[in-house]
Amino acid sequence: MAEPLRICITGGAGQIAYSLLYSICKGDVFGSNQPLTLLLLDIQPMMAVFGRCSDGTAGLCLFLCYKVDIVSTADPKIAFKNIDVAILVGAMPRKEGMERKDLLKANAKIFVEQGKALNEVAKKTVKVLVVGNPANTNCMVAQLNAPSIPATNFTCLTRLDMNRAKAQIASRLGTRVEQVKNVIIWGNHSSTQYPDVNHGVVDLGNGPVSIREAVKDDNWLNGDFVKTVQKRGAAIIAARKLSSAMSAAKAICDHMRDWWFGTPEGEIVSMGVVSDGSYGLPQGIVYSYPLTIGPNHKWEIKQDLDH
Ligand code: NAI
């Protein structure tokens, strides 16, 4: 029997985690035969919520997955002990009228503390996905505070933006999202990102064609399409008074599954990673690039795309 993977989810009592636990327990990310130990971290006042949630989750796991053990704690050093994967969701969420940068002060100190705790007690091979906003900056803060872990093990979530961009194209063409491939998100998970369809393809039944060729409307692709993707997070908050949860959980699963098992042949995905200077960007910042991912969780930035 495989050894259990130790997976920590922070913000474990929050709304994204509530949607995420189901898919992880069901095996959507690490496979349904993979035993898991889930370590749920939240702040002390949320421990009462955990009592109820983890009972529910444990019950669910009996039905869904080979074997899942659950530990809930308010201590990062317990939550991060010997972990294989850290999904850092816990942070103050954005409210209506706030940009992600408004969260910086409140959230940076969480990621300093968590970076240090990862450095001290996590496996050196731990794969870290930062979701809490501002995600790129928080990822960089955590990474800089964990110098004993390779910088390539830190990523942040821009898959939600990529999924949103693909959904816009699919909806415009009346096809399924799965038929749209290789849309790129460059930059930050924020309204400054650039959703790029210039290398993307769509299959409308006769094999892949370029998205520009299929859509036949450059004004829309260069205008409303870009703005809609950039502002989608704010539109969700305006409508729900809460930020995206189920779509964020789905994007986390997509990101982690591709990182764990690799990308399909010929496909690129976008993730925020620590820049090595590719495409003329400063080294060390966390920037969303197009990646291919091979076996053993090794990603590479796709080079030489017109940009
Ligand atoms: P939520 O408020 O429902 O849950 C956040 C949880 O984090 C709460 O249970 C809170 O107690 C916990 N928390 C706060 N400080 C903590 C700490 N120091 N350690 C551990 N847990 C802590 O928020 P929600 O909706 O789950 O969102 C979480 C974060 O994800 C927010 O920052 C939000 O802006 C961000 N987000 C990022 C997306 C992305 O694509 N990168 C998409 C959607 C949301």
Image (cartoon, grey):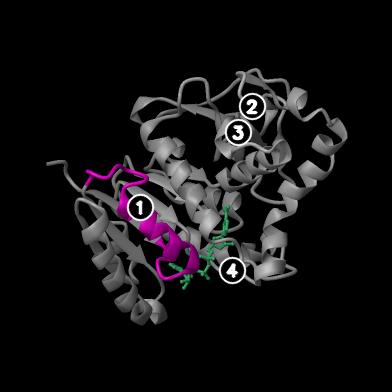
Residue 163, quarter of picture: top right
- The amino acid type of the residue labelled 1 equals Ile
Residue on which disc 3 sits = 289
Separation of disc 4 and disc 3 at Cα?
27 Å
- Mark 3 is surrounded, within 10 Å at the Cα level, by few (under 14), some (14 to 19) or many (20 or more) other residues, namely many
Residue nearest the observer in this picture, 292 or 187: 292
Disc 2 vs disc 3: Cβ atoms closer than 8 Å? no
For mark 3, give the secondary structure. Answer: strand
Residue 32, quarter of picture: top left
**Residue 70 appears in view:** yes
Q: Residue 204's mark?
A: 2
Residue nearest the observer in this picture, 138 or 29: 29
**Residue 187 appears in view:** no
Q: Quadrant of the N terminus?
A: top left
Residue on which disc 4 sits = 106
Q: Residue 69's mark?
A: none
Of marks 1 and 3, the one in the foreground: 1
Q: Residue at x 48, y 47 (%)?
A: 143
For mark 4, give the secondary structure. Answer: helix
- The amino acid type of the residue labelled 4 equals Ala
Residue on which disc 1 sits = 24
Separation of disc 1 and disc 3 at Cα?
25 Å
Separation of disc 4 and disc 1 at Cα?
28 Å
Image location of residue 244, percent across then percent down:
59, 61
Image location of residue 268, percent across then percent down:
55, 28
- The magenta region covers 10-34
| Dot 4 or dot 3, earlier in sequence | 4
